[in-house]
Amino acid sequence: MKKYEPINEIILFEMKKQGLNTVDLSRRLNLSRSSTYYILSRPNIQIDRLWEICEVLQINFFQILSNQLQIENSDGLLADEEKEALKAENKTLKEVIKLLGSAN
């Protein structure tokens, strides 16, 4: 079983990339420093708090976490290849419609 990377480590890594420290994050979240240190010291986090951190740091941590799961969803979502094929087909159809319209 593959070990996942805890969310607090992912957040700390992103903060470092953005040149932010815990005090900066606590100000942006309107939290005390001690609350922010507590949040970042734990490997789990409440969803509503993670949502706020996503907004502050402009990073979709939910997507990062879902990528760690490596589970194929069969809920009708299209793969990238399928999306590209549909885009190409859509473009072709638009061109055909345009040609048919100019033939009249």
Image: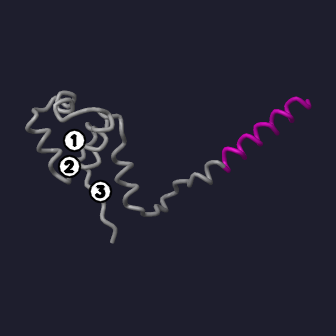
Task: Please give the label number shown on residue 49.
Answer: 1
Q: Secondary structure at mark 1?
A: helix
When the figure is inspected, residue 100 is found, relative to residue 6, above or below; the finding is above
Q: Position of residue 44 (x, y in %)?
A: 20, 53
When the figure is inspected, residue 3 is found, relative to residue 78, above or below; the finding is below
Q: Residue furthest right?
A: 103
Q: Secondary structure at mark 2?
A: loop
- Label pair 2/3, CB-CB below 8 angstroms: no
Colouring chosen for the image of the structure: one colour
**Which residue in the structure is indicated by mark 3?**
5
Q: Would you say residue 17 sits in the magenta stretch?
A: no
Label 1 neighbour load within 10 Å: few <14, some 14-19, many 20+:
few
How many marks do you count on the picture? Answer: 3
Q: Amino acid at mark 3?
A: Glu
Magenta range is: 85-104
Q: CA distance from mark 1 to mark 3?
A: 18 Å
Which residue is drawn at the image coordinates 76% and 37% (left, top)? 94
Q: Which one is in front, 77 or 53? A: 53
Q: Residue furthest left?
A: 34
Q: Amino acid at mark 2?
A: Ile
Observer-side mark, 2 or 3, equals 3
Q: Amino acid at mark 1?
A: Arg
Going from the N terminus, do you reach mark 1 or mark 3 first? 3
**Which residue in the structure is indicated by mark 2?**
45
Q: Quadrant of residue 51?
A: top left
Q: Secondary structure at mark 3?
A: loop
Which residue is drawn at the image coordinates 62% and 53% (left, top)? 82
- Label pair 1/2, CB-CB below 8 angstroms: yes
Q: Position of residue 49 (x, y in %)?
A: 22, 41
Relative horizontal placement of residue 69, taking residue 100 as reference (left or right): left
Observer-side mark, 1 or 3, equals 3
